[in-house]
Amino acid sequence: MSQLTNAAPDRATRPPITVRPVQAGSSLAGNRLSKRAPWILLGASYVASIALFILLAVANGSEFSLVGAAVVGALGYLVIIWIMSSLIEGRRQALDRLVTGLVTGAFALAMVPLISVGITVVSNGVARFDVEFFNSSMRNVTGEGGGALHAMYGTLLITLAATIIAVPMGLLTSIYLVEYGRGRLARTITFLIDVMTGIPSIVAGLFAYAIFAMFLGPGVRMGIVGAVSLAVLMIPVVVRSSEEMLRLVPNELREAAYALGVPKWRTIIKVVLPTSIAGITTGIMLAIARVIGETAPLLITAGFTASMNLNLFSDRMQSLPVYVYTQFANQGNPAFAFIERSWAAALLLIVIVMVLNLLARLIAKWFSPKFGR
């Protein structure tokens, strides 16, 4: 007891421990480049690169290479930022800045073709984005004028039929693989789905054509044949996306339903599917956007025509991708009219795919489970 009573005053009389702040520039904090330094170095690198290529163009009598100046400027920036950061901030921070520059450069390089395609299509296709293009077909049109109304209806009907065929089959297959599939059969189906994901679109078109040619004879061209070929391409995408979404549903939800005596099929309909409906819908919309621009299978199966055809089970049917191909490949007089219609149809296809992707995001947002209620 005496030791304890003597220790208490000693503890009370100890001086408080003080923590000194780390000074800027010490070994722990290290020196840092200012926030504007990377931008200044980037600008200086590009100025030096542009000046170098201007001098080379003048000396050789050639044209100025914008691509070469951009590449050399980016590489020069990476070297300069690595050296400056190594000298001031240390090797660890220098490596971080180097990797950041490489990732940013890769992103910018990937965006170049996308932006270039967008600018090219818009600048060339907006000239024929008029009322006549949307309310008339190519029937009895040999020169200027005409439109793509018959191709729009054909694309809408063929894609809708392909969706009606592919979505139930793909969704039921994914439910089987997640909820019921076990053993060799499930592994075989998964392997075949993986193989179907990578097949060329022309093979899907030849498959659908061969199937219908067996019953209707060679030379068959109908919209439903094109829908079957697109469905073959859609099914593996729907299966894969739906399977991933179903696997994300927690098993606790299934077990809770089973504990209440709910049968398995009803648990899937009432619990599993509503929980994953947002991701499944997004996958379906992306699958539609993936096949709506296919040209090769539709060129083989549905053919092309200049007239309106709204019957999937009779005669040839035009579609927007095939319309783009035929207008550009079979140019008449004047040639610029065919090229303008081709670019306008290409622009319309890009707009449709963009709308489908935006719609998929909105559907995923609307149907996603709401938490925090």
Image: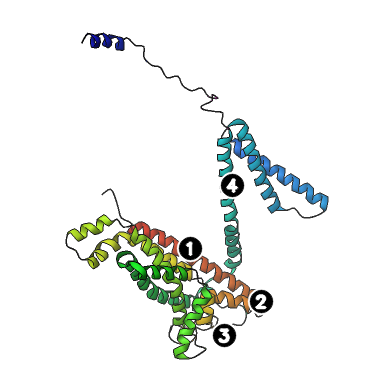
In the picture, the disc for residue 102 is 4
What is the C-alpha distance between the residues marked 1 and 2?
A: 29 Å
**Label whose residue precedes the other's in the sequence (3 or 1):** 3
What is the C-alpha distance between the residues marked 3 and 1?
A: 32 Å
Residue pointed to by mark 1: 354
Location of the N terminus by quadrant is top left
Q: Quadrant of residue 26?
A: top right
- Secondary element at tag 2: helix
Residues tagged 1 and 4 counted as in contact (Cβ below 8 A): no
Amino acid type of disc 2? Ala
Residue at x 33% of width, y 64% of height: 178
Residue at x 32% of width, y 60% of height: 276
Q: Magenta includes 29?
A: yes
Amino acid type of disc 1? Met
**Relative height, residue 31 to residue 17 (above, below):** below
Amino acid type of disc 4? Leu
**Label whose residue precedes the other's in the sequence (3 or 4):** 4
Label 2: few (<14), some (14–19) or many (≥20) C-alpha neighbours in 10 Å: some
